[in-house]
Image (cartoon, grey):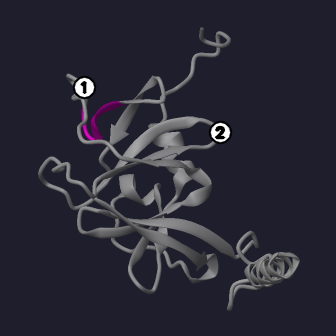
Amino acid sequence: MTELNTSARAVLVERARRLAQPLAGIEEGDIGGENRASVLVVRLGDERVGVPLDYTTEVYRTTELTPIPGARSPVAGAIAWRGRVLTILDIAHSRREPVAMTDATRILVIGQRTAAFGILADEVEDVQHLNTNEIRPVENVSPARSEIVRGTTADGIVVLDAAALIVRFAPTQQSGGPRE
């Protein structure tokens, strides 16, 4: 019995040693380094968009949005999220029709310390680690959109400026103290 336990322990120790090794091609400190950014790549309409992970609180699945009477674009509706009402935006540049909710549709909950709003995503693809020096400015973009777009990557990912999104779209808080 002792030999079996020793053998199993040796296998587990070896697995832990291998899992503790840095990923190939990524040096320790690269991900958090000044020239690196991790983004969640999603589809918004026909665009591939990168949303910084630092500002992505959650990827949430829902089947329907509640319309908000009188709301103007980009507000698509609202959802009940963790005991509160969360406004959902549709910031897809190319979308001309209301989004069709499918099994692939997700809500990206965006915020810095707390959730500010959600972004409607047609599909979530993957997390990518980008070299920020390789993000190039976008030419011929409308002034309203230029403030929320950092640039594009060589493979066509439009990288959003999440801090600018929060400044532009987050509901303003009253400074009268905490809400109860």
Q: Is residue 78 left or right of residue 154?
A: left
**Label of residue 113 in the image:** 2
Q: Quarter of the image holding residue 157?
A: bottom left
Q: Quarter of the image holding residue 8?
A: bottom right
Mark toward the start of the polypeptide (1 vs 2): 1
Type of amino acid at the residue the image marks with label 2: Arg
Q: Quarter of the image holding residue 114?
A: top right
Please provide percent x and percent y for residue 136. 50, 79
Kindly identify the residue that appears in the image at 41 percent across and 31 percent down: 86
Q: Is residue 97 left or right of residue 76?
A: left
Kindly identify the residue that appears in the image at 45 percent across and 70 percent down: 126
Kindly identify the residue that appears in the image at 27 percent across and 58 percent down: 104
Q: Which residues are magenta?
A: 72-79
Kindly identify the residue that appears in the image at 63 percent across and 81 percent down: 133
The vertical placement of 14 against 176, above or below, is below
In magenta segment, residue 177: no
Location of mark 1 (residue): 68
Q: Quadrant of the N terminus?
A: bottom right
